[in-house]
């Protein structure tokens, strides 16, 4: 395996539906994103993680409006990706000791060719936040530890 090849893991539920992915160890990668308008629906510091510069990554559940469509992300991310308002599109890439780490909840949303958001409305996303599945995914993300 080439040295830049990351190691991937996927968490699935009891039915086999993929819910969360994490990829660790990538080198020479970065993020580029479109202009967006971001709203943070939930956030908290992830105590078991530190980026190489000492930054404590954050759990975030966010919605970004790009071209009139809402797109959802739930992941561990750098705090700069939790700034609200007119900003650049978020990135879940973290700079850790073994290279880049990307992660996120796997939402059923398609960007191309026919955009389909994970939720029919922001109210539906907020209602999902009251479910057991949301609580379990958030607990999983908050429990992540990097050493």
Image (cartoon, rainbow, N blue to C red):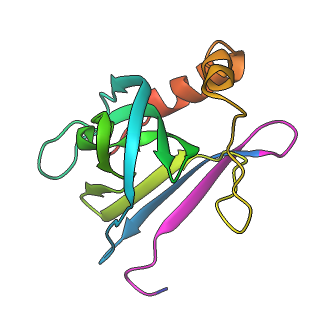
Q: Which x, y percent locates residue 67?
A: 51, 54
Instruction: Kindly give the residue lying farthest to the left in the view shown.
Output: 53
Location of residue 25 with respect to 47 vertically, above or below: below
Q: From what the image shows, is residue 95 above or below residue 126?
A: below
Residue situated in front as seen by the camera: 54 or 111? 111
Q: Position of residue 66 (x, y in %)?
A: 49, 51
Q: Which of 52 and 118 lies nearest the eye of the viewer?
A: 118
Q: Percent position (x, y) of residue 52?
A: 16, 53
Q: Residue 115 at x, y = what percent?
A: 69, 56
Q: In this view, does 60 lie above or below 70?
A: above
Image-based side of 93 in relation to 106, left or right? left
Residue 142 visible in rendering: yes
Q: Residue 145 sits in which quadrant?
A: top left
Magenta span dominant secondary structure: loop
* Residues shaded magenta: 2-17
- Residue name at image x 39 percent, y 41 percent: 37
Question: In the displayed structure, does residue 91 sit left or right of residue 139?
Answer: left
**In the image as oriented, which residue stretches furthest toward the front?**
68
Magenta stretch encompasses residue 57 = no
**Residue at the (55%, 62%) spot, across then down:** 8
Question: Does 84 appear above or below 128?
Answer: below
User: Is residue 147 at least partly visible in the picture?
Assistant: no
């Amino acid at each position: 395996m080439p040295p830049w090849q990351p190691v991937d893991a996927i968490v699935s539920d009891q039915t086999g539906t993929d819910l969360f992915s994490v990829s660790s160890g990538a080198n020479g990668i970065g993020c580029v994103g479109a202009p967006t308008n971001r709203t943070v629906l939930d956030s908290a510091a992830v105590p078991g993680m530190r980026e190489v510069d000492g930054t404590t990554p954050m759990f975030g559940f966010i919605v970004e409006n790009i071209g009139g469509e809402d797109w959802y992300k739930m992941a561990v991310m750098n705090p700069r990706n939790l700034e609200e308002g007119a900003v650049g599109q978020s990135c879940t890439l973290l700079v850790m000791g073994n290279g880049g780490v990307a992660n996120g909840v796997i939402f059923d949303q398609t960007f191309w060719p026919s955009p389909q958001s994970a939720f029919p409305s922001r109210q539906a996303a907020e209602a999902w936040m009251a479910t057991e599945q949301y609580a379990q995914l958030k607990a999983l993300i908050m429990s992540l530890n990097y050493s």
